Structures are given as C-alpha cells and as structure tokens.
Image (cartoon, helix red, strand yellow):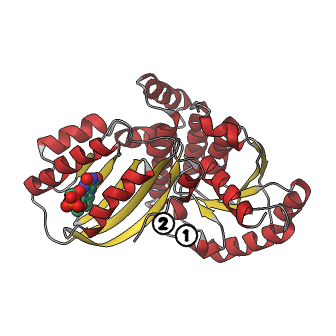
Amino acid sequence: MSLEFQAAETDPTNWIGSLAYRSKATADLSATELQGLTSNARLRNRKCGVTGMLIHQDGQFFQKLEGPPASLKHIWASISQDPRHDDIEMLSEHIVPARLFSDWDLLVYNSANASPAFGGELAENSGLFSKVPKLVDLALGGDDIGTNTLIASLAEKGWNGDAILAQLIEPTARALGDAWLADDCTELDLTMGLSMLQLAGHAVRHRPTPEAIRETKYSILLATAPGEPHMLGTSMLADLFTDAGWHVDMAFPGSDEALANQLGAQQPDALDIGMSEALSREHTLATLRETIQQSREASPDHLTVVSVGGRMFAEAAATAASVGADHARDSVVGTTVRIAELIRQKRQIRP
Ligand SMILES: Cc1cc2nc3c(=O)[nH]c(=O)nc-3n(C[C@H](O)[C@H](O)[C@H](O)COP(=O)(O)O)c2cc1C
C-alpha cells in the first residue's frame, strides 16, 4: 500500500495530507500495551508534525492521521508494516485545507479499557463527538434556539467551523438516521432534525483559506440526487464553496432529465450529487450511476469532475468508482480543495 499525495506536487508548502484506515488487531492488547504503543506514537507524531486520532474497539482499529504529506508517508511506512494489526483497509487518503485534530498528537479512544487515563482524556478532549447525543435531542425536539446556543458556545470555546461540521453536525445526521431506523423517531422528526442541523451548519463560519484564491476560477453545480429529499450535505457545501470563492449554483432536480437540462445550460466545471447524510440508500446506487452517466453526456466538453456524497460514501459503504464518479466525499470538509485539485489534474492530462 503506498501513499500518493498528488496535490503536493503542485504546491507542497500549503497542503496537509490526511489518511484514514481500519484494521484488525492481531492479538488482544492490554491497556498497558496500548498505552505503550500510543505514547511512542505520540512522541513520533509530535516530532513529525502529524496529528490524529486512534480508536481501538472490539479488536479493531480505526485511525485518522493528518500532517505534511512527506511525514505521513514516513509514519505510514511503519504503521503499515506493524505486526500488531493486519487486514488494513485504507478508507481515504487526500489533501485537506486544515487539520481537524490540530491539538492532538494522537487522540486515543479505547472502548474496551475505559481506564481513567483514556476515559479522562476522551471526556476532556473529544469535546465535539461527546456533544452528539445532546445535539440529537435538540434537533429532534426542533429546538433551534438550543441548537444555535450550543454551536455558538463551541465556536466561542475555539472550535473551528470545519471541526464542528465534521465531528458534530455530520455524525449527528447519521445518529438521527439511526434513530429513525430504530423507530425512535418519525420520518417527520427526522426531516425536522435535519433541517435544524442545516440551520446550525449555516451558522458556522468558514474562514476563507489561502487556497481559496487559487480556486476562484471554478464553478460547481451542487445538486441533490433526483428525488432525494435530504439536502443537508448540499446545503453545507453551498456555504463552503461560496466561502472558498467558487461560482455556485444549486439544483434540486426531480429527474435525471431536469439535472441534465440544468447542466447543459450552466456548463459548470464540477458537479456534486448529494444523497442523504442520515440514511444509507444502497438500493439507489445503480440509479445514481445512471444519473452520473447522463450528467456527463449532458455536458461532455465542460464538466470535468463529478463528485458524490452522503452517508454511504462517508462510511465507505460505496466508492466513487462504484457509481462512475471521480470523487466521493467522506465529509463536506475539504471538498472544495479536493475538487479544485482534481479539476487541475484532469485538465493537465487532457487540456
Ligand atoms: C494501530 C496502530 C496505530 C499506530 N499509530 C501510530 C502513529 O500514529 N504514529 C506512530 O509513530 N506510530 C504508530 N504506530 C506504531 C508504528 O507502527 C511503529 O511501531 C512505530 O512508529 C515505530 O516504528 P519503527 O519500528 O518503524 O521505527 C501504530 C501502530 C499500530 C498497530
């Protein structure tokens, strides 16, 4: 397995690489062994400017790391050869505009051994994830004031907008979907909860990044999948792309034909098609593939990148390739930078 951070070739100084994988522990790790592993890992991460998180649960690892691409490559060379785990499955590797875990050399969550060291650390440091149940309650209760107060208080404590989206709002959307599946709420509650989150996401401020200046020449059509009633992801993307200086249009088409008509008329550089952030919709993957094919045919000369998103892609239950897209987002955060980079790369190959 190798890491190829192609974007670093264009301007390595500003980019942060990010990778996420899951793997299986080859043997039961005691709390002491895990502590040994993570304290060494932290020291090395700090030395290399790498930050991230590691979850150890039910004999499995999930790790997300971010940092300068060369450092990540170096550390990954060790991790990928480590005999303490196998069945390594890379979930994502890409460039992000900012770190999500800037304060943590390695935030560790170990569910099996909630020893004071780990438990205390989680309670103290995983501030945003731990707010998910509270936001679920507020959203299901339709409490917009409570929701906005919670988000505002987190922003005051110094959480940046990207972290609030990726570590709180997106996980809360999935938790709402789970509540609906478990019959803990009605479809109306779910829809209302998602619109509460949409408002909350809207209130989150995004600082335009230095990359924004380089992105301004591009345009994107942000569409919900034909017939998809959930539009949380599309709405969050609208704020992110606008703040990054893109020309943004939105579409809520009822059919592939309506989407194709809009594409033909607007000729954007990129198209993002959003599925539900709350529910997996595996049965619609074939339909999505057809939508993407028709979209490309509607704008054969101009449409360069087709991106997809939604819970299925966030949880790696489906990939971009499986629906004929160029990009699948596991979070709305970082999408502007990744799509800009993809447009650049594809146009370099085929101007
Ligand atoms: C699940 C898992 C996660 C790890 N995470 C890190 C990490 O974030 N940073 C790190 O330096 N080492 C990490 N390690 C340890 C490395 O695999 C390796 O043992 C350590 O970096 C020393 O590398 P070396 O023996 O190549 O010098 C991890 C190991 C495992 C099994």
Assess disc 1: are there few (<14), some (14-19) or many (≥20) residues with their C-alpha within 10 Å of its C-alpha. Answer: many
- Asked if residue 155 lies left or right of residue 345, the reply is left
> What residue did someone put label 1 on?
319
- Asked if residue 301 lies left or right of residue 142, the reply is right
Residue extending furthest bottom? 286
Kindly identify the residue that appears in the image at 55 percent across and 69 percent down: 319
| Residue 329 to residue 293: above or below | above
Q: Secondary structure at mark 2?
A: loop
> What residue did someone put label 2 on?
316
Quadrant housing residue 120: top left
Kindly identify the residue that appears in the image at 21 percent across and 44 percent down: 43
| Residue 37 to residue 324: above or below | above
- Image coordinates for residue 89, horizontal then vertical, percent: 38, 70
Q: Amino acid at mark 1?
A: Thr
Q: Amino acid at mark 2?
A: Ala
| Residue 239 to residue 67: above or below | above
- Asked if residue 168 lies left or right of residue 196, the reply is left
Assess disc 2: are there few (<14), some (14-19) or many (≥20) residues with their C-alpha within 10 Å of its C-alpha. Answer: some
- Image coordinates for residue 254, horizontal then vertical, percent: 79, 61
Mark 1 CB in 8 Å range of ligand 1?
A: no
- Asked if residue 101 lies left or right of residue 57, the reply is right
Q: Tell me the CA gap for discs 1 and 2.
A: 6 Å
- Image coordinates for residue 122, horizontal then vertical, percent: 25, 41
State whether residue 232 appears in this view: no
Assign the C terminus to one quadrant of the image. Answer: bottom right
Image quadrant of ligand 1 equals bottom left
